[in-house]
Amino acid sequence: MTDDLTIYKQIYPSQCVKIAELGYRSVLNIRPDAEVNSQPNSCDFADASAKANLTYQHLPFDDERLSIATVEQFAAFYRAMPKPILMFCGTGARAKLLYQSALMQGLL
């Protein structure tokens, strides 16, 4: 999306070292835990991110529960997290929606 933010589909904790090697400094997971059986949970990402020296935040939401509070929290994370940030969800669609919502609200 920008030099400071990449939106991507599901990643895995084992990829955190490579993500750091690619120059990312933060990971933002917006996927709710247990959305599908095969996805890793947020605590596994927190551990893997810490080992890779990445800042990690989890802001779970689904399309039906996107609220102004979620958009505001995203904007706060975005401003505070070291850049560049890799933000992900299952397919990338919700991540894009969240980013665009924050832009439209004038929060970024």
Image (tube, rainbow, N blue to C red):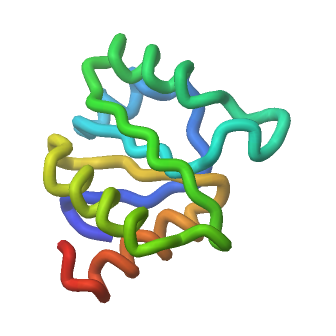
Total numbered badges shown on the rendered structure: 0
Question: Is 93 on the left or on the right of 6, as rendered?
Answer: right
* Foreground residue among 64 and 42: 64
Q: Residue at x 55, y 30 (%)?
A: 42
Q: Residue at x 30, y 66 (%)?
A: 72
The x and y percentages for residue 58 are 45, 40
Which image quarter: residue 103? bottom left
Question: Is 72 on the left or on the right of 4, as rendered?
Answer: right
Which image quarter: residue 106? bottom left
Q: Quadrant of the C terminus?
A: bottom left
The x and y percentages for residue 6 are 36, 58
Question: Is 6 on the left or on the right of 95, as rendered?
Answer: left
Question: Is 48 on the left or on the right of 14, as rendered?
Answer: left
Which image quarter: residue 28? top left
Give the residue furthest to the right: 37
* Foreground residue among 81 and 7: 81
Q: In this picture, is 40 found above or below 33?
A: above
The x and y percentages for residue 99 are 37, 71
Q: Quadrant of the N terminus?
A: bottom left
Q: Residue at x 29, y 48 (%)?
A: 85
Give the residue furthest to the bottom: 104
* Foreground residue among 54 and 30: 30
Q: In this picture, is 91 found above or below 64?
A: above
